[in-house]
Image: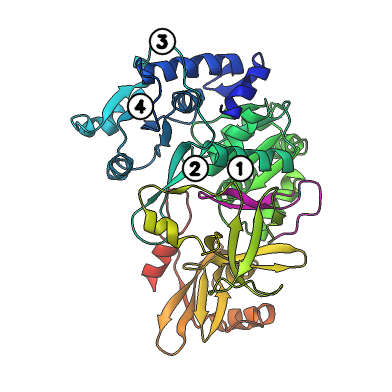
């Protein structure tokens, strides 16, 4: 029995989803997902973990399709709406998805694959009313495959069971005190845990309302906020950065209206990437809200969170969530003392089942005694965990020292002439790696690199300072507007 869906029966008349200027009740969601499940079964008793891939924009359609797949006993494989066709084809081939469901707007993208006999392509609109008996789906069964690139090789399919997902939901709904009167706006991609679990499923577990914007737009977000219905919001740091920039361009009267609306929110969360302290502080000055930072991964959902009611310390991610156990270990998987950096390792019922058809990769990501090795480096200090970076990307190994690129970036952003920056390790025969910093300056500024080095020395006495700088105005950026680590490396 899938408890998420059973709980929805207690809220039939409440609005579950707002999407495309329409409201949909829990009763509507239950009835529609049941029809989809019956059509997927086509007279069979159970899909028996058949992989069902789907390409649908974040919306009511997405949720009813996800629930329909689950109620039929299938494994949901959400596809990224922004991925090019080769990336989509990779997921379809890797999961051996027998059925691919799509909404009309993605037909032209998928059409080159329609002649592939390995997959059955179905338009969502082609689904008609169906009736029948649905299987009893045990929580131990596989529920979802999400793809994560990691740092090497092809993307891996992260397999979560219904039990894993339920544990991820309940740890957040209890820690963040979700209730049925909550109303959250979802602007996040729906092929990631952040948008799927933290926002959508937590809302639906609680009998609350999840409102979708299929495409992020700063003004559209503020328009929704000023209506006064939404009281929760979760986003990545880039989105908060864009909202701040848009707020700065608004007329004063609109700024006041937005800020007044934001003051009435009960919770705003930032995650999926390190939150610059400068963004946290600027957003707090605009909204009166101190963003709650948390830490998680596709493989485990959320594991660590700042306190909902207690003090939130900038730069820290807080303490383990309910039913999650954390340790910091060295390269030999031995626990380190407080104040010493090491890898975050996790145990709990939230941890994923396996990488899809990759038993060796699954085995290698766990210690011999069953701890999941995240690959993220952190330190426990002042009663909280603080992330230093990804072991293979954000930790620079120079002269025998492990140096956090994120920590240097945070300090550089505080310089009055620096608008944005990126720090990477550059191979070096003498030091192993030296620190490279790429700077984007505020408009009309120039900078003396020797003076900048002295400025950094005062603030980072513990580090050998960057020995090489490159300044370039027009750095390559990804679709979210951020300069990527890989692109920075190409500059050096």
Which numbered disc, 2 or 1, marks the residue that appears first in the sequence? 2
Q: Which residues are magenta?
A: 290-314
Residue 272 position, x and y percent, is 56, 51
Q: Nearer the viewer, residue 350 or 80?
A: 350
Q: Foreground mark, 2 or 4? A: 2
Which numbered disc, 3 or 2, marks the residue that appears first in the sequence? 3
Label 2 – label 1 distance at C-alpha: 10 Å
Which numbered disc, 2 or 4, marks the residue that appears first in the sequence? 4
Find numbered disc 4 in the image and state the secondary structure of the residue it sits on.
strand
Label 4 – label 3 distance at C-alpha: 17 Å
In which quadrant is the C terminus drawn?
Answer: bottom left
CB atoms of marks 2 and 1 within 8 Å: yes
Question: Which residue: 47% across, 68% down?
Answer: 392
What residue is pinned by disc 3? Answer: 130
Label 1 – label 4 distance at C-alpha: 26 Å
What residue is pinned by disc 2? Answer: 160
Find numbered disc 1 in the image and state the secondary structure of the residue it sits on.
helix
Disc ID at residue 101: 4
Q: Quadrant of residue 347?
A: bottom right
Question: Which residue: 67% across, 64% down?
Answer: 386
Residue 301 position, x and y percent, is 57, 47
């Amino acid at each position: 029995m899938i408890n998420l869906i059973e709980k929805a029966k207690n809220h039939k008349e409440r609005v579950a989803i707002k999407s495309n200027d329409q409201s949909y009740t829990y009763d509507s969601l239950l009835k529609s997902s049941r029809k989809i499940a019956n059509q997927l079964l086509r007279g069979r008793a159970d899909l028996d973990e058949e992989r069902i891939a789907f390409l649908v924009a974040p919306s009511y359609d997405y949720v009813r399709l996800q629930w329909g797949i689950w109620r039929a006993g299938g494994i949901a494989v959400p596809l990224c709406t922004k991925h090019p066709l080769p990336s989509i084809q990779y997921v379809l081939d890797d999961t051996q998805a027998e059925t691919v469901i799509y909404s009309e707007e993605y037909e032209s993208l998928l059409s080159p694959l329609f002649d592939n006999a390995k997959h059955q392509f179905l338009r969502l609109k082609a689904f008609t009313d169906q009736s029948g008996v649905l299987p009893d789906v045990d929580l131990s069964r596989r529920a979802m495959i999400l793809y994560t690139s990691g740092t090497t090789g092809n993307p891996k399919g992260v397999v979560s069971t219904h039990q894993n997902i339920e544990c991820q939901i309940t740890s957040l709904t209890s820690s963040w005190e979700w209730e049925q009167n909550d109303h959250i706006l979802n602007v996040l991609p729906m092929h990631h845990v952040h948008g799927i679990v933290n926002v959508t499923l937590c809302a639906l577990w609680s009998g609350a309302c999840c409102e979708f914007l299929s495409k992020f737009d700063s003004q559209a977000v503020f328009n929704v906020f000023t209506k006064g219905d939404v009281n929760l919001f979760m986003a990545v740091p880039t989105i908060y950065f864009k909202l701040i920039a848009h707020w700065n361009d608004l007329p004063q009267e609109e700024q006041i209206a937005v800020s007044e609306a934001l003051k009435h929110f009960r919770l705003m969360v930032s995650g999926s990437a390190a939150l610059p302290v400068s963004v946290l502080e600027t957003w707090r000055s605009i909204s009166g809200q101190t963003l709650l930072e948390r830490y998680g991964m596709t493989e485990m959902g959320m594991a660590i969170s700042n306190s909902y009611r207690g003090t939130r310390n900038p730069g820290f991610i807080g303490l383990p969530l309910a039913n999650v156990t954390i340790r910091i270990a060295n390269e030999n998987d031995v626990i380190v003392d407080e104040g010493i950096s090491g890898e975050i390792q996790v145990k709990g019922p939230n941890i994923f089942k396996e990488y899809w058809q990759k038993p060796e990769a699954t085995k290698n990501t766990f210690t011999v005694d069953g701890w999941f090795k995240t690959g993220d480096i952190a330190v426990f200090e002042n009663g909280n965990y603080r992330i230093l970076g990804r072991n293979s990307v954000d930790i620079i190994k120079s002269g025998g020292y492990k140096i956090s690129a994120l920590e240097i970036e945070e300090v550089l952003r505080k310089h009055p002439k620096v608008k944005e920056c990126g720090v990477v390790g550059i191979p070096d025969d003498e030091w192993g790696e030296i620190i490279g910093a790429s700077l984007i300056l505020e408009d009309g500024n120039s900078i003396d690199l020797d003076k900048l080095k002295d400025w950094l020395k005062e603030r980072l006495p513990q580090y050998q300072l960057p020995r090489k700088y490159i300044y370039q105005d027009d750095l390559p950026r990804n679709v979210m507007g951020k300069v990527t680590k890989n692109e920075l490396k190409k500059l050096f």
